[in-house]
């Protein structure tokens, strides 16, 4: 290669004597694109999940065409390798545009192919690409056996593409609203298996006709060179809504805490209840109803109903082994303990290394957390599967108020991908359904404390009184949820164990959730670490 040609490859604009339709077959282009360009581009994207690690190199796992007639785009499956000896996979669709004014902020590479100058961009920024993807799903044929498999549900009724727009800023995926009626979620971080969100949504929607999720409408899966089915996109109905249940709960809790002053309530006189006691609305004392209002408890009952219905649907499958209920066994116990003890040690290390970032109550609780680490570890070790009679099923896995949409007086459940830290295999392990319930309970706890932290100055009460009022309210929330949830579950013969087993599993799963949350808070916003720390100590200190 001459010096002049080397220089033409070493800096933009890159020039290749190849047409776009054959560009990915050009080894020189692929080498330059991966090493000189994509590494810098990928690490700057919101959906890139490796920011806490050091990138070693990036390689193209494989590519495929996303096309219709003469219109061609490429889907890239990228492997990001890290210095810490692990890797992640990402999906990036690319397009070539020649319009100088287009996608100025989203250009990946200035390039000249044959005699045409232009730019390679993320194809999702191109409406023509979004239209093509939609039309390929719309015209999908049953039992597609090609490499790129488009699928549409029997309920898919759209007949033409009208418009598309981005849904908004997302952390790990990119969602596009189509015709103001559908959403296509493009998975950026991908796995060597069907994505749980696709798998669960399609199962609940098509097999069980569960109505309180956005209905499955279509998908795109790729069969890779190892014959593994990889999900790259999921299409669902767009559910009209008033926001998520987290924001709704924060609004309601602010009104509830304002009522302390408005109704001249003395916190010390509020009646208490024991943790995990099943309650109907009539079991909630009039003083609590007068303070918090009836509506919030009716909403909690409705959320409990929808949660129970989801678990009943997931626990009633006896044909598909991926969803068939199973019992606890030794393999599950070993898997669970290994996973949780590793995670717990990770959280201990994070807390020990970041004590200097804490102060006040957070610091006190963190010190207690470290002092009592052996007691907490023992709780995780104290899991004896032989004493558990309930069933394990596929569950949501990352269930909290932010995964629930509010629609008038009802709720829709979202995002079945599972915990972001978990491997794809771990996300598909059958778990006690009470793990999802524990996730919602931790979310109630978060919302209460987030309200006190965020708006506490507006309530003329001491922090001690606000915490006490919050803990009382929290127990009634839990009780009313359990009252509805357990009753409906038992009516449909899903075995979640007897009372003591349920309490053991709830405490165990809530402790697991709180320890999981601690890592996020210590890394992202240490001032909030008090919430999971309070949750951990509350569970450890609870003698009921």
Image: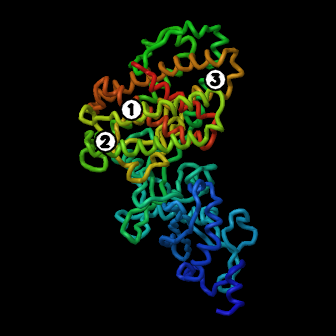
Find disc 1 in the rendering and name its residue: 379
Q: Earlier in the sequence, mark 2 or mark 1?
A: 2
Residue in view at x 39 percent, y 48 percent: 200
Of badges 2 and 3, nearer the viewer stands 2
CA separation, marks 2 and 1?
13 Å
Find disc 2 in the rendering and name its residue: 333
- Relative to 418, is 62 above or below? below
CA separation, marks 3 and 1?
34 Å
76 or 445, nearer to the observer: 445
Image location of residue 424, percent across then percent down: 41, 53
Q: Earlier in the sequence, mark 3 or mark 1?
A: 3
The residue most toward the bottom is 2
Is residue 178 visible in the rendered image? The answer is no
Task: Report which quarter residue 93 is drawn in.
Answer: bottom right
- Where disc 3 sits, the SS reads helix
Q: Quadrant of the C terminus?
A: top left
- Relative to 184, is 373 above or below? above
Q: Earlier in the sequence, mark 2 or mark 3?
A: 3
Disc 2 residue crowd, few under 14, some 14–19, many 20+, Cα 10 Å: some
Task: Report which quarter residue 103 is drawn in.
Answer: bottom right
Q: Are marks 2 and 1 in contact (CB under 8 Å)?
A: no
250 or 542, nearer to the observer: 542
Q: Quadrant of the N terminus?
A: bottom right
């Amino acid at each position: 290669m001459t010096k002049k040609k080397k220089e033409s490859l070493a800096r933009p604009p890159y020039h290749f004597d190849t047409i776009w339709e054959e560009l990915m077959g050009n080894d020189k282009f692929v080498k330059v694109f991966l090493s000189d360009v994509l590494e810098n581009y990928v690490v700057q994207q919101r959906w890139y999940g490796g920011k806490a690690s050091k990138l070693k190199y990036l390689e193209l796992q494989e590519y495929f065409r996303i096309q219709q007639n003469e219109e061609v785009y490429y889907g890239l499956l990228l492997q990001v390798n890290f210095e810490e000896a692990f890797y992640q996979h990402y999906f990036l669709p690319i397009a070539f545009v020649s319009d100088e004014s287009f996608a100025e902020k989203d250009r990946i590479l200035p390039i000249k192919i044959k005699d045409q100058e232009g730019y390679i961009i993320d194809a999702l920024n191109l409406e023509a690409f979004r239209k093509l993807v939609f039309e390929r799903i719309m015209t999908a044929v049953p039992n597609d056996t090609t490499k790129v498999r488009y699928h549409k549900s029997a309920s898919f009724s759209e007949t033409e593409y009208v418009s598309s727009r981005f849904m908004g800023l997302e952390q790990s995926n990119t969602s596009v609203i189509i015709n103001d009626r559908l959403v296509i979620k493009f998975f950026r971080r991908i796995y060597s298996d069907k994505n749980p969100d696709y798998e669960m949504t399609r199962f609940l929607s098509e097999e069980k006709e569960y109505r309180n999720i956005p209905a499955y409408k279509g998908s795109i899966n790729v069969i890779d060179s190892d014959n593994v089915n990889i999900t790259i996109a999921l299409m669902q109905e767009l559910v009209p809504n008033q926001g998520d249940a987290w924001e709704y709960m924060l609004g309601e809790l602010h009104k509830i805490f304002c009522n302390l002053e408005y109704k001249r309530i003395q916190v010390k006189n509020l009646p208490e209840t024991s943790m995990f006691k099943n309650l109907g609305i009539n079991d909630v004392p009039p003083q609590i109803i007068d303070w918090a209002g009836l509506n919030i408890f009716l909403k909690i009952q409705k959320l409990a109903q929808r949660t129970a219905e989801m678990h009943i649907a997931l626990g009633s499958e006896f044909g598909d082994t991926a969803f068939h209920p199973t019992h606890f066994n030794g393999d599950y116990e070993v898997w669970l303990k290994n996973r949780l003890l590793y995670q717990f040690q990770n959280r201990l290390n994070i807390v020990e290394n970041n004590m200097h970032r804490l102060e006040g109550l957070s610091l006190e609780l963190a010190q207690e957390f470290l002092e009592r680490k052996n007691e907490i570890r023992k709780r995780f070790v104290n899991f004896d599967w032989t004493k558990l009679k309930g069933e394990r099923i596929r569950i949501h896995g990352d269930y909290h108020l932010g995964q629930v949409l509010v629609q008038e007086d009802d709720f829709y459940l979202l995002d079945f991908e599972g915990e972001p830290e978990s491997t794809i295999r771990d996300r598909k392990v059958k778990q006690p359904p009470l793990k999802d319930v524990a996730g919602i309970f931790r979310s109630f706890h978060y919302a209460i404390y987030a309200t006190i932290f965020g708006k506490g100055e507006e309530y003329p009460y001491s922090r001690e009184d606000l915490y006490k009022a919050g803990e009382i309210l929290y127990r009634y929330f839990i009780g009313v949820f359990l009252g509805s949830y357990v009753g409906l579950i038992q009516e449909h013969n899903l075995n979640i164990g007897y009372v003591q087993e349920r309490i053991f599993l709830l405490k165990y799963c809530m402790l697991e959730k709180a320890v999981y949350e601690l890592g996020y808070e210590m890394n992202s916003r240490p001032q909030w670490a008090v919430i999971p720390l309070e949750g951990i100590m509350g569970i450890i200190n609870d003698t009921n």
